[in-house]
Image: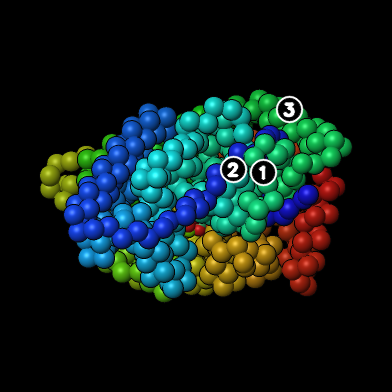
Amino acid sequence: MKFKGIAASPGVAIGRAYLISEESYCVIKRAVGSGQVKKEVNRFKKAVGAVDGEFRQQREKVALEMGKTYARLFDAYSLILKDPLFYKDTIKIISEEQVNVEYALQTVIDRITKTFSILDDEYMRDRIRDVQDVGNRVMRVLLGHEHVSMLDIQRRVVLVAHALHPSDTVEMKKENVIGFVTDVGGKTSHVVIMAESLEIPAVVGLKRITRHVSPGDLLIIDGDTGFVHVNPDPDTVRSYRKKKRRQEARKKELVKLRDRPSVMRCGTGIELTVNIESSREVSAVREYGAAGVGLYRTEYLYINRKELPVEEEIYENMKKVADECYPHNAVIRTVDLGADKMSEQLGIKPEGTPFMGMRGIRLCLAYPGLFKTQLRAILRASVKKNVSIMYPMITGIKELRAANHILREVCEELDNGGIEYDRDIKTGVMIETPAAVMDIEGISAAADFLSIGTNDLIQYTLAVDRVSDSVSHLYNPSDLAILRMIEKAINGASRAGKPIGMCGEMASERLYTELLIGMGLRSFSMSGIAVPAIKHLIINTGLEKCRQLAERVMGASDTEEVMDILKENRETRNF
Ligand code: PEP
Ligand code: MG
């Protein structure tokens, strides 16, 4: 059997299926006498205590294996255990209805699921999954079932699950979890971002894969095309083994390029930098021979934790990135909270369309205390002069001026306190909204550099939710509307004499590299793993060829023609 889902994390994995079953408990309502109520409440409290203990242990294990940022997910889980909607309400049902704890707990899980699933919002759906995950853990303890931790998996397996939770992903060990497939999910969910950085192939959004796979089935996952084969015939296995061997050999070959400069045959240099999500990942700069960090997404310092980080913690984190990157530059993006990355501590009420709501720079300008704390920390980490600041989600010059105004205030405070920082620090702007493209001249005049964020630019230009699997077929970087946006941004920045790069996912796709160079782009930022293949392409191509390609593509009459030209170009490449 063959299934097609969303290609989420690249590479091929061949292995036996390990099913993470959705918990299906048979919970029976049992009346307990008034004398039994206390006993049931105590059973609940004991189970909650046991699960809290499990979370603490997992937190420590994950902190050791993956770092503190990921480990903080377990703080959020502990918070759910204590949340009155979860904790007090379960006790209330036991006491008032005089029923068994399992029934009371199931009622609470169902109630929370029902209340929040009315909101058609990916972020809230993730939170519901968290509550279900926590609730199921408590139920397991009550029913005497064991918890399957990803850290306990001792064989090399392919995980098959309806949904994976961030707490599962952070526990995954690359040695044992060789790939995963899920029924639900979109390409830019947290789970997928982590899988990519762990280099675990994954296909998501397969709808009903869990119904078609049994434990021990042989699976082939193709994270490049989104195909999943269940119990394939020997010929298919052979051809995928070949593909996998080819990929591994190619990877080894490409690693040799690490110390080669990223320069085209004609002598034109192209800057390749990495995108990172946590300070630990800064090692990718050296590992993949990149020219620094082109985008540090700092949100992971803020989400899934009890309190907002204090200046000292942010400073240590930024300093680690700056120091390990040195002498290369690190572009630190100010926190892009909101939408699918919300910090609970801010108490922002759920929004109907969160991607259009309180997000990115808007949120920072509305919470100047939070913004200033981060700016202070970034500035303090800039003493070696290898740090730049970048603002996310700018929609116009007014926001840019407001952000720069706050930055100047923070600089003055540091001056008054005699605290050192880089007085010539560069400030850049993410070009990721159509409004920013339309005023590229104004923004370029007021910024030191620009970086095109195609992940959001595509979603806002084409009105396609970037995390929804139902409209993912419409999310197309080759769309002429997108290419014209990019062309306008590059030309506007060039006229103003300001450097412009790209840090959205499109920058890591070989299909577009030559086109983008031909359009005038000279700087690309991407996940570390993508760097060697892009560098290989750059070394083997030339500016004239790229320009001719760009001319043909931009002269196309529709998106279909664009895609035909790009595919033809890919097929005629012999590297
Ligand atoms: C983008 O929008 O392209 C981008 C790089 O930012 P993020 O994916 O973090 O929204
Ligand atoms: Mg973005």
**Label 3 element class:** helix
Q: Secondary structure at mark 2?
A: strand
Q: Name the residue rendered at 30%, 39% in the picture.
A: 50
Callout in the foreground (3, 1): 1
Q: Is mark 3 within 8 Å of ligand 1?
A: no
Q: Amino acid at mark 3?
A: Ala
Density class for disc 1 (Cα within 10 Å; few <14, some 14-19, many ≥20) is: some
Sequence-earlier tag: 2 or 3: 2
Q: Is mark 1 within 8 Å of ligand 1?
A: no
Q: Which residue is mark 2?
A: 19
What residue is rendered at 59% in x and 42% in y? 19
Front-most of 279 and 81? 81
The label shown at residue 77 is: none
Estimate how packed mark 2 is, as few (under 14), some (14 to 19) or many (20 or more) residues with alpha carbons within 10 Å.
many
Q: Which residue is mark 3?
A: 249
Which residue is the site of mark 1? 214
- Residue type highlighted by circle 2: Leu
Query: How much space separates mark 2 and mark 3, taking CA atoms?
Result: 30 Å
Give the amino acid at mark 1: Ser
Q: Are marks 1 and 2 in contact (CB under 8 Å)?
A: yes
The x and y percentages for residue 311 are 22, 45
* Distance from Cα at disc 1 to Cα at disc 2: 7 Å
Closer-to-camera residue (94/550): 94
In the image, what residue occupies the spot 32% across and 49% down?
76
Residue 228 appears anywhere in the view:
yes
Q: Tell me which label, 3 or 1, sits earlier in the chain.
A: 1
Q: Nearer the viewer, residue 119 or 440?
A: 119
Tag nearer the camera, 2 or 3: 2
Q: Image quadrant for the C terminus?
A: top right
Label tally? 3
Tag 3: Cα neighbours inside 10 Å, few (<14), some, or many (≥20)? few
Q: Position of residue 557 (x, y in %)?
A: 78, 73
